[in-house]
Amino acid sequence: MDYEKLKNNLEKLKLMRINEILDNYLERAEKEKLGIIEILNYLFEEELKSKIQRSIDMKMRMSGFPFIKKIESYDFNFQPSIDRKLISDLETLKFVYNAENVVLLGPPGVGKTHLAIGLGIKAIEAGLNVYYSNCHNLILSLKQANYENRLKHKLNTLAKYKLLIIDEIGYLPFDKEGANLFFQVIVRKYEKHSIIITSNRRFSEWDEVFGDKIIAAAILDRLLHHAYVIAINGKSYRLKERKNSGLFDNNYFAKK
């Protein structure tokens, strides 16, 4: 009866990992003549590890990442223009704790999104809330929220994330409403929480992207006030993979 009560209490307290390993571990503890403190320490350490992993798994599901790419799998030898030491410093997440931003600039295919998501995964593994969105989809969701009178709630939700990743700025132009909504996101995050942005456009072209020099300047002023800017001047990974697959001949890539 005591053992059954213990199992029921573990279930009610949602100590799932302890409940899972208890039987086998108690047999082992008896054989090895382990003390009560050693037993309790092991069981609670296992429960803590399990809770941390479940939290990470949940944050990963909620992050909106389109795929999983870790920093460790990035080929820095293929992109020698990147300062590896700077990336290592960003991996410590000091920029997140200091509410600083990261801007990744470069042509399509050089791994901007890979690095952004890799840093986002590091933040999640550290227990932080992260949200990823393609820029176009973000603006569409903001417009929908504005139409449904939910804009304040939407902006407040985005503002709460310790790290917000906005991917692919510059691929599609902003209309006036979109530019204003994007500006509001930047204002809400400014000096409170961090943003990672990827773009294929130079800063000098952002007035063209946003369709308004004043809004572009106001966005850049806040975004770059506390920011690391990483310009990637390299070849496309996607073209490299196609070359390796034999879909194109070497003359095609010699022109790139």
Image (cartoon, grey):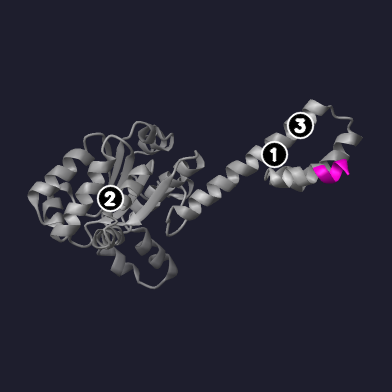
How packed mark 3 is, by other alpha carbons closer than 10 Å (few <14, some 14-19, many 20 or more), is few
Q: Which residue is mark 1?
A: 46
Identity of the residue drawn at 30% across and 39% down: 101
Let me know if residue 124 is in the magenta part. no
Residue drawn where x is 82% and y is 28% of the image: 36
Displayed quadrant of residue 52: top right
Residue at image mark 2: 152
Give the magenta range. 1-5
Spot occupied by residue 251 in the image (x, y as percentages of width and height): 30, 69
Query: In terms of secondary structure, where does tag 2 sit?
Result: helix
Q: Which residue is mark 3?
A: 40
In terms of secondary structure, what is the magenta stretch mainly? Answer: helix
Amino acid under label 2?
A: Lys
Amino acid type assigned to the residue bearing label 1 in the image? Glu
- Pinpoint residue 61: horizontal percent, then vertical percent: 49, 55
Q: Nearer the viewer, residue 219 or 71?
A: 219
Of the two numbered discs 2 and 1 on the same chain, state the one appearing first in sequence: 1
Q: Is residue 191 left or right of residue 57?
A: left
Tell me the element at label 1.
Answer: helix
